[in-house]
Image (cartoon, rainbow, N blue to C red):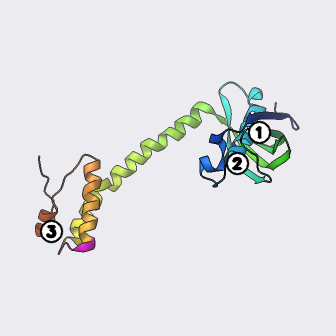
Amino acid sequence: MLEIGKSYTIEQVVTPEMTARAIGSGGLEVFGTPFMMAMMEHAAMDCVQPDLPEGKGTVGVDIQSSHLAPTPVGMTVRATATVTGVSENGKLITFRVEASDDWGPIGEGTHTRAIIANDRFLQKCNSKLTQAKQKSRKRGGPEALLAFFVRRVSPGCGGAEQKSFLIARKALAISGRGPYNISSVCKHGNTTEQGV
């Protein structure tokens, strides 16, 4: 049973790899906002995980946070998550999240996590790869781009058309289904494979 008011705190010393400059969210060597928010999520996850049945976990579905003050490399940051609510169906958990360093508060906000069945969630996630490959095959992949070129822009084969063809040919070569000869496409409106 998830308890309203339960809180959990994690802490970490800021390293150069955790700076805004390192992650690309800013240009300075100060604690980066993405890392602060990740610590908030981590605290929320650790807060409720012990109360979940075997095989269950949580995933973040929403986070709103301010970043109020900078923290230098070498200083310790603490992130605290406090359970503020559980949805009626028991699938969503809301948290108040806060971050501080040795000088005081640096961030605050809210966070929501969904309770999931780990295996089912991973299966659904990984099925995206299979579905994406199937969609790519249905659309025709690079061959469809080359066919478009042949149907629409092969007459004349000048400037922009030639660049389009070269892009399509490169895509086919990368996929292992080329090379194609541009001169045969421009003269005859079809493709010929070389080296086959």
N-terminal of the two: label 2 or label 3?
A: 2
Q: Quadrant of residue 164?
A: bottom left
Q: Are marks 2 and 3 in contact (CB under 8 Å)?
A: no
Left or right of 144 in this view: 94: right
Amino acid at pointer 3 = Cys
Q: For the stretch drawn in magenta, what is the main secondary structure? A: loop
x, y percentage for residue 82? 84, 40
Callout 2: SS: loop
Read off the residue under disc 2. 30
Amino acid at pointer 1 = Met
In the rendered image, the quadrant that contains the N terminus is top right
Q: Residue at x 45, y 42 (%)?
A: 129
x, y percentage for residue 132? 43, 47
Read off the residue under disc 3. 186
Read off the residue under disc 1. 75
Left or right of 196 in this view: 97: right
Q: CA distance from mark 3 to mark 1?
A: 65 Å
Name the foreground residue: 115 vs 49: 49
Observer able to see residue 87: no
Residue interval drawn in magenta: 156-160
Q: CA distance from mark 2 to mark 3?
A: 56 Å
Q: Residues within 10 Å of mark 3 (few under 14, many from 20)?
A: many
Task: Please check the rendered image and state whether residue 157 is part of the magenta-colored stretch, yes or no.
Answer: yes
- Tell us which disc is closer to us: 3 or 1: 1
Task: Please check the rendered image and state whether residue 106 is part of the magenta-colored stretch, yes or no.
Answer: no
Q: Is residue 171 above or below residue 165?
A: above
Left or right of 135 in this view: 71: right
Q: Residues within 10 Å of mark 2 (few under 14, many from 20)?
A: many
